[in-house]
């Protein structure tokens, strides 16, 4: 099966072209896995059509939150670490998906698939950016559903960040101040999201968090990670 995407605007053509480039890059990195493919057709600057292979797999809604998706999120992190290069990128900038939300991830019993690549860029963000964004967007939806910020939810985020740290060169800024770093990166590089972020401010919902909220969350994450590291050091000495 094929999914057809068409547009009759210049901005839309740009989005589809970036999605096509993202799918090609992603397909080239999925060694030994089923490949997502696409074909791009453009007649002139304000019309384009993208044909993408249909993936028969499941998805979950972001509103389902963290607790219900811990195992899936760990699978996604390991998939990211397998696909993304860990070296060889200039100035510490790596490819970016740009909208890695649970609704843009398909999965089955064996594989993970990242879809909707219209914000793809080859060398733009520090390693781990997309995963950190995913974790905090999922936390944001958990928070809306629970109507308060549960420390248990942030403990899950902290543990998932630790897993990411063990799998690749997580940028030091993302490790020390993950939420603040992601939010600042988006605000300082909003051209990567172009017209869509201006038209749909809630496209990246973590941008609605206040500065004090972001600082408090980052402090709790840092405290959780430090405690986790210390506990493992003590355990290793006692072994």
Image (cartoon, rainbow, N blue to C red):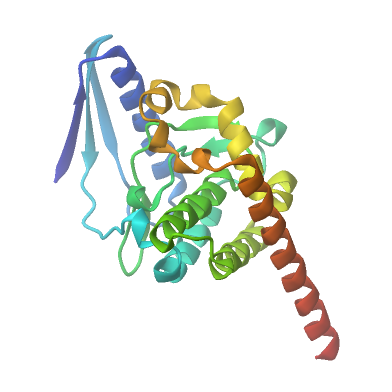
Quarter of the view holding residue 109: bottom left
Q: Is residue 145 left or right of residue 175?
A: left
Tell me: residue 232, above or below residue 87.
Answer: below
Q: Residue 157 at what x, y percent from top left?
A: 57, 62
Looking at the image, can residue 122 be seen?
yes
Q: Quadrant of residue 47?
A: top left
Residue in front for this viewpoint, 110 or 230: 230
Between residues 90 and 154, which one lies in front from this camera angle?
154
Q: Position of residue 162 (x, y in %)?
A: 65, 64
Residue, far bottom: 239
Q: Position of residue 22 (x, y in %)?
A: 41, 35
Number of callouts in the render? 0
- Considering every residue shown, the one lying at the far right of the view is 237
Residue farthest along the top direction in this orientation: 44
Residue 54 versus residue 162 in the image, above or below: above
- Where residue 202 sits in the image (x, y, percent)? 40, 36
Q: In the image, what residue occupies the spot 51% across and 21% down?
A: 191
Q: Is residue 127 visible?
A: no
Q: Nearer the viewer, residue 79 or 201?
A: 201
- Look at 83% across and 90% down and name the residue there: 238
Position of the C terminus, as image quadrant, is: bottom right
Q: Which residue ends up furthest to the left in the rendered image?
A: 1
Q: Who's the residue at 30% across and 65% down the image?
A: 108
Residue 60 versus residue 87: which sits nearer the camera? 60
Quadrant of the image occupied by residue 150: bottom right
């Amino acid at each position: 099966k094929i999914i057809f995407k068409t547009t009759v605007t210049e901005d839309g053509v740009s989005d589809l072209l970036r999605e096509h480039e993202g799918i090609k890059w992603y397909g080239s990195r999925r060694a030994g896995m089923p490949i997502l493919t696409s074909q791009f057709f453009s007649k002139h600057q304000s019309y384009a059509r993208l044909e993408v292979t249909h993936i028969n797999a499941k998805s979950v809604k972001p509103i389902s939150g963290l607790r219900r998706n811990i195992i899936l999120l760990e699978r996604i992190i390991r998939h990211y670490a397998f696909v993304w290069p860990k070296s060889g990128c200039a100035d510490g900038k790596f490819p970016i998906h740009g909208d890695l939300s649970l609704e843009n991830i398909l999965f089955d019993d064996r594989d993970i698939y990242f879809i909707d690549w219209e914000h793809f860029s080859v060398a733009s963000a520090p390693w781990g950016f997309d995963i950190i964004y995913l974790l905090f967007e999922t936390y944001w939806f958990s928070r809306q559903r629970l109507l308060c910020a549960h420390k248990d939810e942030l403990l899950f985020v902290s543990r998932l960040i630790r897993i990411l740290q063990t799998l690749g060169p997580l940028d030091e800024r993302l490790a020390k101040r993950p939420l603040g770093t992601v939010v600042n990166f988006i605000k300082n590089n909003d051209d990567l999201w172009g017209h869509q972020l201006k038209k749909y401010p809630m496209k990246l919902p973590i941008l609605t968090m206040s500065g004090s909220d972001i600082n408090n969350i980052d402090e709790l994450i840092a405290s959780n990670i430090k405690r986790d590291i210390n506990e493992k050091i003590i355990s290793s000495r006692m072994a």
